[in-house]
Image (cartoon, rainbow, N blue to C red):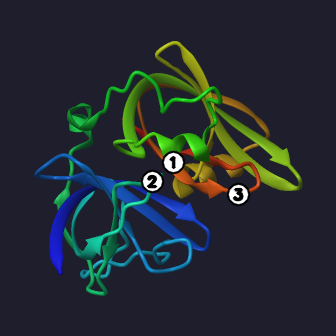
Amino acid sequence: MFYKDIICLANSRKMHGRCVAGKDIISGRWIRPVSNNEFEELPDPILLKNGQELALLDIVRIPFKEKKPTYYQPENILISEEAWERKGSFDKTKLDDLCDYPDSIWIGENNEGVDVEYLKSNKIENSLILIKLSDILIVRKDEYNKKKVRAIFTYNNKQYDLGITDPIIEKEYKNKNEGEYKLSGKIYLCISLGEPYIKYNRCYKIIAALIKV
């Protein structure tokens, strides 16, 4: 067993649990803690040693068993059963120091996802990024009798329309009427590649966290 301290930059919904990701406070590298469950999701909620629930920007010490990378999520590390320990909180006014600056949000003709065959034949460095935007459009609409929350934004002259799995943002906008809501200011998005969606043979790009400063 080994330990790593990470800054929590995503605590999103995944199946019947949570997907957590963050950056190693020493190396700055992305880490995604995973379980041995079928879809590798974590419990919901994630309770820390002090009894509190894990929150975005918490600095937490996590016990791990072993690395468990996949071709679509190379940062995955299998957690141990021991409880996580909160070590502090990261100052959100310093989020610029954690940002990534890729040319695009993963390659591919489809801005919503990346084909599985491409990922299998082209090794990716990471499946997580943190970017900063000055404005974003949140879209709340009903589809198939379900309330959907998505975000439309432009990054390096490319437009993206991605689903949001940040539970706090989802809850906020599902309580609103259908429509478009523009946010401006300092907006940070943690974007993740999800697991392969077999029906379309694609890994979709997901907004796992939206942090407003």
| Residues at discs 2 and 1 in contact (Cβ within 8 Å) | yes
* SS type, badge 3: loop
Question: Looking at this rendering, what residue extends furthest in the right direction?
Answer: 144
Quadrant placement of the N terminus: bottom left
Mark 1 vs mark 3: in front: 1
> Are circles 3 and 2 on residues that touch, CB within 8 Å?
no
Quarter-wise, where is residue 112 in the image?
top right
Left or right: 76 as drawn, with respect to 135 = left
At label 2, the amino acid type is: Tyr
Marks 2/1: CA distance?
A: 6 Å
Question: Could you tell me which residue is drawn at 46 percent across and 74 percent down?
Answer: 42
Q: Position of residue 208 (x, y in %)?
A: 49, 50
Where in the figure is residue 7, as x and y percent of width and height? Answer: 25, 54
Which residue has dot 3 on it?
198
Upstream in sequence: badge 1 or badge 3:
1
Residue labelled with disc 1: 120
At which x and y percent is residue 142?
83, 46
Q: Earlier in the sequence, mark 3 or mark 2?
A: 2
Residue type pointed to by label 3: Ile
Residue 171 in sight from this viewpoint: yes
Residue marked by disc 2 = 71
How many neighbours does mark 3 have within 10 angstroms: few (below 14), some (14-19), or many (20 or more)? few
